[in-house]
Amino acid sequence: MTSRLRSILFRFRKSRNELPDNCYVKSALPYELIEAIVREAWTATDIQTRWQLFRAISTLSRLWRAVLIDVALRHVFFESTLDLMAYRSLIARHLILNGAEIGDDFHRSFAKHICVSLSIDSVSKPFEVSQVAELIPNARFISLSILVDRRYLFSSIVPHLLTDRPSLTHLRLCWPPLERSYSCSMPSAVVTSVTHLHIPRHPYASLNAVLALFPFVTHLRLGTPCFLKNLVPYMAAVQVLVLDSPPNYNTHTSNGIAGRAFPSSVPLWNVWDALEYGLLRTQKAIRTRLIINAGVDDSDEHTVHELAMSCRDRGIQFECRRVYDAYHLKSVSEVDRWNFGAWL
């Protein structure tokens, strides 16, 4: 950043009532705009760029550094050993400044507003989940990505990281691409605080066991087609169900000419059978909702229309959103970790 740009950025004076004394500086931008800029940049970082960005912003001014620390303590990453070391220092410094220490009431209170992105790779074993749990005794949102095929991981994660966190209402779980027969061991613990659950990709043979861990989920989003009717007993509290149905991209040859086909994946969910088994049927006076995110160019109008009629007959609100283009491909890590609109 040039010195001319530096001088332009810092001409706006922020009052002492809104900032700590050591952050009383001049800035060309309102505090809220600086916060939005820093948050957008910080949440878009990866392992390679995260702490380079931290150092770069920290040199701009005391105000930008204060904003950055505040954002970094609300959007927390544990995706490498460096992340763990850096956050151990940041959190310890924050607690000392407030006369607190690891595990006390202040730590738990401040942590209840935290959003966490955690990636687990047991091949390189960058850190242990218990170490993360000590630093994050509570959280509002956790995005957990398991990057490698290890059956025992999830059963060890749940008791350490997901239980005994009363503020944890929003949870995102993503497994790596797995075979259809894949199953993983499940813990005996039950997580009662989670009400919004997003599972972009799951162990195919264990999804019912995963859902059983979260009996009070009211908003559920699934990203991998499965037989919904088998899950109905584990979805008794669900009021809003979102199903991702991007087109199935494949190639074919007709008369010696190669072409592409983008068939709809909506039928793969077998929603009709699930409705017959009681999907989204509730004893309460609550109108449930079914939302399908489908392809923009899918030729499935008749299928969707029939599904809409079935939902209407059962008092279920139905919506089909055309959000995926024909070339949509899911990534291995599903990097859209901060999607707070996933359950709308």
Image: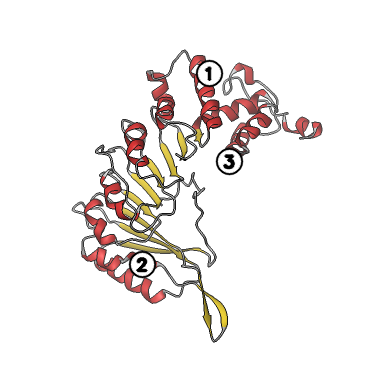
Tag 1 secondary structure:
helix
Does the rendering let one see residue 164? yes
Residue receiving disc 2: 268
296 vs 268, nearest the viewer? 268
Amino acid type indicated by mark 3: Asp
Q: Earlier in the sequence, mark 3 or mark 2?
A: 3
The amino acid type of the residue labelled 1 equals Arg
The residue wearing badge 3 is 46
Residue at 41% x, 74% y is 301
Disc 1 from disc 3: Cα separation: 23 Å
Q: Which mark is residue 93?
A: 1
Q: How far from the left and from the top, in percent, is residue 294?
A: 44, 65
The residue located at (53%, 22%) in the rendering is: 89
Quadrant in which the N terminus appears: top right
Is 273 located above or below residue 150 in the figure?
Answer: below
How packed mark 3 is, by other alpha carbons closer than 10 Å (few <14, some 14-19, many 20 or more), is few
Residue 114, quarter of the rendered image: top left
In this view, the mark in front (1 or 2): 2
Residue 204 in the image: x percent, y percent?
A: 34, 55
Q: Amino acid at mark 2?
A: Leu
Q: Is residue 290 left or right of residue 59?
A: left
Marking on residue 64: none
Pick whichever, 143 or 1, lies toward us: 143
